[in-house]
Image (tube, rainbow, N blue to C red):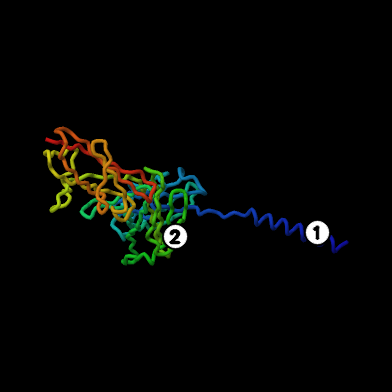
Amino acid sequence: MRIATIKITVLLLAGVLSGFFVHAQLVPDALSLAASPSSPSPEETVTVQAATPTFDKNTAFFSWSIDGKTRPDLSGAGKDSVTFIAGTVGSATRVNVDVSRSDGEGNSASLMVMVSDLSLPWFAETYTPKWYAGKALPVASSVVSVVAVPQIILNGRALSPQELIYSWDLDDEEGVVSGIGKEVLRVKMSDLPKTSHHVKVTIEDTGKRIKKEGEIFLVASAPKVVIYPSSPLGGGEWRAAAAVFTASVDKLLDFVAEPFFFSAASKKNLSYRWDVAGAEVFGSPQNPHILTLNTEGFAEGTIPLSVSVDDKDDLVSPAFGSFNLQIQ
């Protein structure tokens, strides 16, 4: 019976100890500092907040200093935060606070705020004419590459992508791509027109000293087509797009349909349907985007002319272009 009693006592003691360790909690620091943003961009406003979880901040006196210079203008009873303007990329600001509590106790904390920068250029894989100087825009079902270009300088040296950890979020999905050197995210736009996607990236150095975040919204545009006059010798007159063209009777005219922002690699991969005065016509099989029109037989007046351009291999809606041909 004595042996059984000892076993029961040991089991009860083990249960008590087990319950004690399960309910044990960490005691928070009496004072800590946090910056928002934690790694600011140049000339960005930074707020450093003092957290005092174990005592009432309203009964404490906060004495702040920035880069070793005491700031009485920022100090005082209950003043648990300071604000300053970040410097240039690679610079660092040291913030220190001394807190005198009403019970006579004192605490201090310091924080180094390091300045970095981040840009997120993107490139849509959609068709634009070679002469077009603008930016290719994303459309439904197209692919867009987002590139994270950080400027993170530590110890006077800019860190390369292979020294940084990237974590990408896409819409509601976190960590869709992550790892060292993963500075590019390729996004397939939704099949639905006029949708947008939220892209966010978090970048840290391998020593976890700097954390930089950035985000953009990718918004789907609609493909479009513009009709330009063309000549056999000069080609398309790219500056001559207009709502009305004027021509004389008995004249041979060329018009070219120039598509923008389709997912097709070439405009020859698109289908073209021309309409002249309500009648469907077609360009040549070799160049369906070019329409040759003979005005012989047309009476003087206005002739509506339009073109529909469709990506046969995609779900993007056709694009329409039109103008009025004025016969004199």
How many neighbours does mark 2 have within 10 angstroms: few (below 14), some (14-19), or many (20 or more)? some
Identify the amino acid type marked 2.
Ser
Left or right, residue 135 beside residue 26: left
User: Mark 2 or 1 closer to N-term?
Assistant: 1
- Is residue 313 or residue 128 the one in the foreground? 313
Determine if residue 106 is in view. no
Image quarter where the N terminus lies is: bottom right
The residue under label 2 is: 178
- Is residue 54 or residue 20 the one in the foreground? 20
Q: CA distance from mark 2 to mark 1?
A: 53 Å
Q: Residue furthest right?
A: 1
Q: Disc 2 on helix, strand or loop?
A: strand
Residue 146 at what x, y percent from top left?
35, 55
Identify the amino acid type marked 1.
Ile
Residue 140 at what x, y percent from top left?
37, 47
In the picture, the disc for residue 8 is 1
Quadrant hosting residue 21: bottom right
Name the residue located 19 percent from the left edge and 46 percent from the top edge. Answer: 292
Determine if residue 158 is in view. yes
In this view, the mark in front (2 or 1): 2
